[in-house]
């Protein structure tokens, strides 16, 4: 059994309740793009646009899950999932300009389905986490990805 060095809980993302105007805007933009796609003769792309907008709308209504995070001497535990340090390429700490958001731990992993993890550091000292992780994983400053910017822009 691995020895737990740090343990905390946090939501996977900050939930923002969207009003009806947000969903109307999503629908209008998606419908406009789908119609333009059909006019240019690409019906399949129109279908992808409509399905993508539906997925974004469903994701926007979903409440974030509360996860348990634990740093052990052999890896990171997120709820029931274990990430050994050998599968983590690098880490970085993110401090947001928005004071209401807690600092976050950014991890680049070797995983295909989840290559970039953002973990909120609620109720734990980020400096302690940095010092502990620095002993196990290389520290490399991470730039926000296109997906990160898109999530912020869409307020997801």
Image (cartoon, rainbow, N blue to C red):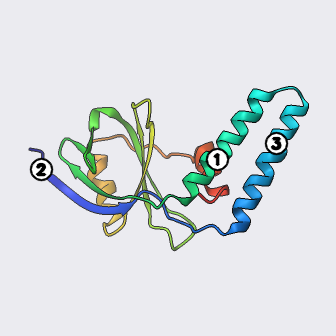
Percent x, y of residue 156: 58, 57
The residue that appears at 58% across and 57% down in the rendered structure is 60
Residue 54's mark? 1
**CB under 8 Å between callouts 2 and 3?**
no
CA gap, disc 2 and disc 1: 43 Å
Q: Which residue is mark 3?
A: 33
Q: Residues within 10 Å of mark 2 (few under 14, many from 20)?
A: few
Image coordinates of residue 20 in percent, x first then y, are 69, 67
Mark 2 vs mark 3, foreground winner is: 3
Which of pointers 2 and 3 lies earlier in the amino acid sequence? 2
Quadrant location, the N terminus? top left
- Please say if 5 is above or below 80: below
Task: Give the Cα distance between marks 3 and 1.
Answer: 14 Å
> Hey, which quadrant is residue 154 in on the image?
bottom right
For numbered disc 2, what is the local secondary structure?
A: loop
Q: Residue at x 44, y 60 (%)?
A: 64
CA gap between label 2 and label 3 equals: 52 Å
Quick one: which residue is furthest to the bottom in this view? 100
Residue 62 vs residue 146, the one in the foreground: 62
């Amino acid at each position: 059994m691995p020895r737990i060095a740090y343990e905390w809980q946090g939501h996977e993302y900050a939930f923002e309740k969207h009003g009806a105007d947000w969903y109307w805007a999503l629908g209008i933009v998606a419908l406009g793009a789908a119609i333009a796609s059909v006019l240019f003769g690409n019906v399949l792309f129109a279908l992808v646009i409509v399905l993508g907008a539906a997925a974004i709308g469903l994701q926007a209504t979903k409440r974030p899950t509360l996860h348990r995070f634990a740093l052990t001497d052999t890896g990171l535990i997120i709820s029931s999932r274990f990430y050994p340090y050998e599968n983590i390429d690098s880490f970085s700490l993110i401090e947001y300009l928005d004071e209401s958001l807690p600092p976050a731990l950014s991890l680049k992993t070797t995983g295909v389905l989840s290559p970039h993890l953002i973990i909120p550091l609620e109720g734990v000292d980020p400096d302690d986490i940095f010092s502990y992780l620095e002993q196990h994983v290389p520290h490399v400053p991470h730039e926000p990805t296109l997906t990160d910017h898109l999530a912020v822009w869409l307020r997801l």
